[in-house]
Amino acid sequence: MVLGKIVALASQKFEELRWNNVYEGYRRKYEVAKTFRFNGPGICLIGDNRIRLGENSYIGSYSTIQSDAKGCEVVVGRDCVLSHYIMMYTKSHSANPELRRKGVPDCESIRIGNDCWIGVRVFIRQGVTIGDRVVVGANSVVTRDVPDGCVVAGCPAEIKKGFSVQIPEIGLTTRNFSRKINFSIDEV
């Protein structure tokens, strides 16, 4: 019984060290801010093109960011929370069989602004720009650009609410954002 617990604990620590080593490799290969956090195992950054991950942001376990298409990049701003099982790909193969046979990929950059919160199991399609202070609901598929200061959800993701953010002298301090901010939610 005790031996089993020791083996389980050792195995857990080994996995943690293994993933930390993988994440250090990502920090060398891509532009990852010192304060960016890989939050759990199984996070994959794929491709030989630019991936920029901002200050005080983090991504949850089993998420994938792919920047494989030439000239394309993935940029995540500062103070962003990306939950678990997030998928972002700069390249996809066309549904058109003629283009697919020719090997013409559909590729565009992905950009996520500052102070965003991306829920669990969100897919962000190539070519999408998500503005500042955006909330993307869990299980959403983001297929088009999202303007600043709104809440989107669904498949495909649609604007559900908009909110304005002021940064006054005194405001609400949240755990996920580094600055004091005051939210007021209005219907769009």
Image: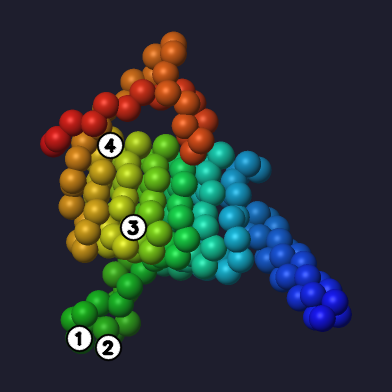
Question: Tag 4 or tag 3, which sits nearer the N-term?
Answer: 3
Residue 128 against residue 80 in the figure, above or below: below
60 sits to left or right of 156: right
Residue type marked 4: Asp
134 or 12, nearer to the observer: 12
Task: Report the mark closest to the observer, 4 or 2.
Answer: 4
Residue shown at 52% from the left, 54% from the top: 59
Pointer 1 residue: 98
Question: Tag 2 or tag 4, which sits nearer the N-term?
Answer: 2
User: Can residue 43 be seen by looking at this rendering?
Assistant: yes
Residue type marked 1: Glu
Question: Tag 1 or tag 4, which sits nearer the N-term?
Answer: 1
Pointer 3 residue: 138
62 or 48, nearer to the observer: 62
Residue type marked 3: Ala
Task: Identify the residue at the far right of this view.
Answer: 3
Pointer 2 residue: 101
Check disc 2 and report its element: helix, strand or loop. helix
